[in-house]
Image: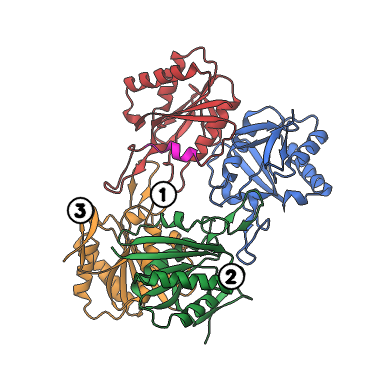
Chain colours: A orange, B red, C blue, D green
Amino acid sequence: MPTVYVLTTGGTIEKVYSENSGSVSNTENKIDRYLRLLRLPDAEVNVVPLMNKDSLEMRDQDRVLILGMVRAILKENAPIVITHGTDTMFETGLYLQRALPELKTPIGRTGAIHPLGFEGSDGLQNLTESLLACRLVQPGIYIARHGTLYPAGRVRKDKTIGKFVWND
Amino acid sequence: MPTVYVLTTGGTIEKVYSENSGSVSNTENKIDRYLRLLRLPDAEVNVVPLMNKDSLEMRDQDRVLILGMVRAILKENAPIVITHGTDTMFETGLYLQRALPELKTPIGRTGAIHPLGFEGSDGLQNLTESLLACRLVQPGIYIARHGTLYPAGRVRKDKTIGKFVWND
Amino acid sequence: MPTVYVLTTGGTIEKVYSENSGSVSNTENKIDRYLRLLRLPDAEVNVVPLMNKDSLEMRDQDRVLILGMVRAILKENAPIVITHGTDTMFETGLYLQRALPELKTPIGRTGAIHPLGFEGSDGLQNLTESLLACRLVQPGIYIARHGTLYPAGRVRKDKTIGKFVWND
Amino acid sequence: MPTVYVLTTGGTIEKVYSENSGSVSNTENKIDRYLRLLRLPDAEVNVVPLMNKDSLEMRDQDRVLILGMVRAILKENAPIVITHGTDTMFETGLYLQRALPELKTPIGRTGAIHPLGFEGSDGLQNLTESLLACRLVQPGIYIARHGTLYPAGRVRKDKTIGKFVWND
């Protein structure tokens, strides 16, 4: 059975509501629990919880860690989905693209603008899409969300409107 | 058919997640929408959205408004449920109790420690309980939540542990 | 901490959808799992799964079993909630009422017309209501559902319209 | 903005629970309501509710209707998702494949083994997957579900085990 890796790094998709503080933050891993709601009988899904950060707080050394883990997984020749905050998903994508010019499997990235488990969340849709996309497309680095697949480097987040826009 | 009033004032029960700011706050009324998930064929439920505040920000003039609206509704001789933040629910309860010594209908109050519509919310349970309790109990001022009915003045919130504790 | 017993006997509230047969039936206990969605910190809730039957198939010997278990629990002087199909909930209520003339604790009964876990279910509302009611009311046999508490013997199900109607 | 058509024909994915009969059947369209839970800002999704049948009851004349509607939509050069019961999804697929040898857009089909809106449903996952797949793949007839894309004619349903199996 083919294997897919899900490398989790945090972002809105994984934010939880704290009853003590009354606010949302990246304190608990929840990707794992939501993946169990999906039926994926033809793949072995391995979740690797690498870090749990708001992507605005991601630093160079975090991206070094992500790249290191991606390199380790690539040795298994398996597709990878990386969950990541949307604010700096593009920066991380370009960084991986420069570091991995000869990819042999797809790397899908996804996130959410509304946390998993909150009414109206887009998280499970985006997870579903990235898991399917990484089994259908050519090697390369992509973002899958909201019904669309974006090649890395072709889009960026326009923070004034909170949307993804094409670079050209 | 008997009438019940639901007077909404805000609190955690009604907090919403904002995709723009990535935080939760009292910006939209949602009690109405959740009441529609309950089946209450034997009562006409009238929702009165009075204010939408974190109860830590409730001031004397807010309690004056709540009391004014409660007095207006009491003319109809109908039970009232007030949704309210838990942090100052007790202060508001004592204020109403002093101002309304000769109550002829029950006033139930409720809130939540986890917003309606977020996985793990206690909001719908508490709404259900307060709506039933205000039809079963003697005139007076109560809090209904988490399977228990508390008479006003008998409990307070211990903020160090985030729980309701009995006064005596 | 006070104890409450939940005695489960089946009915629509506990029906499950079978992917093999494409139909719904009483094959798995699910009350337990849904009770865990409620916050009941002030009571110890003991679930006793006695049987799992469509209430149209309940026979005299089933009611003998229910009565036997109720008698055993009453020795603990704890309130009891019985989950039961709505079609013969009244018959079982009258049977218990005749057999238990000197009740010292409330016995609440509840059920649902839409299974737990199906969108639009009234099951969790009814469970919430019966658990609260059995802590608030006088000894006696009741039905709690849809925001109303019915004393046993005062209502029946009108099968032509699918609703509860008062006897008098 | 690109257009996608969703042609609904019934099947388990669209079954509803009837409170009157206590059973599940194909009586109401619900695909539309669930599609609104997905975020698809880059596509105009047009839902065409053609019929609402258990696929075991699908007859030749039903497939003639499906083909007729597919031909009409193909004039718009838009991808199509057909929701369909899984029991005869393969027969319908082969029928469409023979009738449409020169396809210029993808036709995705999907269904579910657990109705939309029932806890544990695979319906929204499958809808999400088929909507993404029909925007990524070459013209042809496919089934998308449970994380896998199957080309028409390559799989069949093994009714003894309730699973899809490859033909060769």
Is A103 contained in the magenta span? Answer: no
Residue D107 position within the rendered picture, expressed as x and y whole percent measured from the top left: 42, 73
Is B61 positioned to the left or the right of B165 in the image? Answer: left
Quarter of the image for the C terminus of chain A: give it.
bottom left
The chain letter under disc 3 is: A
**Tag 3's secondary structure?**
loop
CA distance for labels 1 and 2: 36 Å
The nearer-to-camera label among 2 and 3 is: 2
Residue A140, by quadrant, is bottom left
Both labels 1 and 2 in a single chain: no
Residue C15 on image: x %, y %: 64, 54
Which residue was labeled with disc 2? D58
Kindly indicate the quadrant of the structure image that contains residue C95. top right
Q: Is residue A120 placed above or below C105 in the rendered structure? A: below
- Secondary element under disc 2, as helix, strand or loop, is loop
Q: Which of A62/B11 is in front?
A: B11
> Which residue is tagged 3?
A159
Q: Is residue A132 above or below residue B120?
A: below
Residue C55 in the image, given as x and y percentages of width and height: 74, 48
Q: CA distance from mark 2 to mark 3?
A: 50 Å
Q: Identity of the amino acid at label 2? A: Met
Mark 2 and 3 residues: CB-CB less than 8 Å, in contact? Answer: no
Other-residue count near label 1 (Cα within 10 Å), few / some / many at <14 / 14–19 / ≥20: some
**Residue where numbered disc 1 is placed:** A119
Query: How would you classify the magenta stretch by its main secondary structure?
Result: helix
Q: In the figure, is residue C147 to the left or right of B116?
A: right
Of helix, strand and loop, which one carries label 1? loop
**Span colored in magenta:** B29-36
Residue drawn 32% across and 20% down? Answer: B61
